[in-house]
Image (cartoon, rainbow, N blue to C red):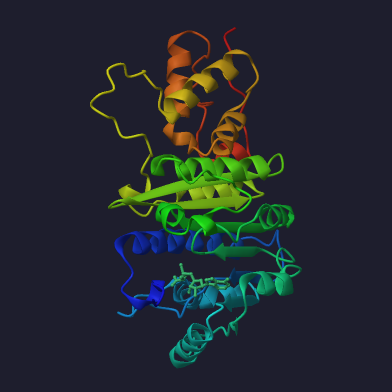
Amino acid sequence: MARYDHHDKPYDEGTRQKLRIYAAFLRAWIQVFLHTQAFPGPLRFFDFFAGPGQDINGVSGSPMILMEELARHYDLIGSSNRGIEILFNDFKEKKARALSDLCAARRYPFVPRIESEDFFKSFEGHREEIGCSPSFVLLDQCGVKFVTKEIFQYLTTRPQTDMLFFFASSSQRRFSDQFANDLQIPTDTPYWEVHRRVADCYRAWAPLNYFVGQYSIKKGGNIYGLVFGSGHWLGMYKFLTTDSGEEANYEIEAPLRQRDFFIETKLTKLEKLEEELEHLIREHVLLSDGAVALHCVTQGVLPTKVAPTVYKRLRAKGVLGHSREQQPRSSDDAIRNPRPLIFLH
Ligand SMILES: C[S@@+](CC[C@H](N)C(=O)[O-])C[C@H]1O[C@@H](n2cnc3c(N)ncnc32)[C@H](O)[C@@H]1O
């Protein structure tokens, strides 16, 4: 029986949502590097599971999204003297050829290298290039078997490298063999738990001070997971501010069953973080608005979602003082230029 191929039919809504998130994050990433001279050298893009460039209806896939985004920034790229290096790979020759033809037909101002290799071979051939200058690695695989512990850890050690990878919870059911890489997520793990467990595994494999973010998109019976990794707080901050629709912010919770008579009062992730911040400020562990904001980012939460509530609560309790001029901020400015918190005791 012929095997199902992702590009044999139109992208479903989950895939389109995933691509919107990718596009939004890519735009933010490109703009960060086009506005700084701090990290010189060409911007490098690696899309190791590129596909043919579009679905059967001509909706842009990840490679076209990149090419269009770069074309849009053509003038800025020129004035900031940045080179652009792009690698697209797909192990299906037919798809690589279709992608090559599409790029040529559209006459984009940048010319990608396009190859057709198995992922591991392609990665081996390019691993040294990743991180030589600002690099963005997209791994839009089927299942999660390709982002092994070795590959993930290698990418976390590369300087100036951000990575984004996707997987669908249905992969766990459909391709349980593909799902079972070093992650060792049992195939009977409830579907609403899979993404959190996967992200937690990667977080545990990451070095200290590395940022791992997670995003989930629920569409029909499927949940698409997205894992983001960056060695820099700004990468994570940009990831957290990338929001391409409410659905993308889906918080996975176990579905409530009617026969659960005793439902534990569970704190949400945000409430838990608020409690933790309150404790860390009271204990004088976090002494500035920058330290508070950075702690939130490290926990994968945008500071504006929790810090203002905590400051308000601590002022009401007489722990923190008021100062019109020295209001604690919850933006990225706070991390760049921290202000001390005003403690009353
Ligand atoms: C989920 S699709 C990615 C789609 C693409 N990002 C897009 O937006 O259209 C996964 C792609 O990876 C390719 N692929 C699967 N296994 C691969 C492997 N071992 N090495 C390289 N490419 C592979 C498939 O042919 C498919 O085009």
Q: Residue at x 41, y 48 (%)?
A: 216
Residue 198 percent across, percent down from the top left: 53, 45
The total number of labels drawn is 0
Q: Residue at x 54, y 62 (%)?
A: 31
Considering depth in this image, is 47 or 177 the residue closer to the camera? 177
Considering depth in this image, is 176 or 278 the residue closer to the camera? 176
Q: Looking at the picture, does residue 262 appear above or below residue 215?
A: above
Residue farthest along the left direction in this orientation: 258
Residue farthest along the front direction in this orientation: 1
Residue 276 percent across, percent down from the top left: 53, 21
Q: Residue at x 46, y 41 (%)?
A: 189
Q: Residue at x 45, y 88 (%)?
A: 102
Q: Looking at the picture, does residue 100 appear above or below residue 155?
A: below
Quadrant placement of the C terminus: top right
Considering depth in this image, is 231 or 187 the residue closer to the camera? 187
Q: Looking at the picture, does residue 252 appear above or below residue 239?
A: above
Q: Is residue 322 left or right of residue 146?
A: left
Q: Is residue 78 visible?
A: no
Q: Is residue 343 left or right of residue 169?
A: right
- Residue 203, quarter of picture: top right
Q: Is residue 39 left or right of residue 288?
A: right
Quadrant placement of the N terminus: bottom left
Q: Is residue 112 visible?
A: yes
Residue 93 percent across, percent down from the top left: 54, 86
Residue 46 percent across, percent down from the top left: 60, 70
Q: Looking at the picture, does residue 107 appear above or below residue 13?
A: below
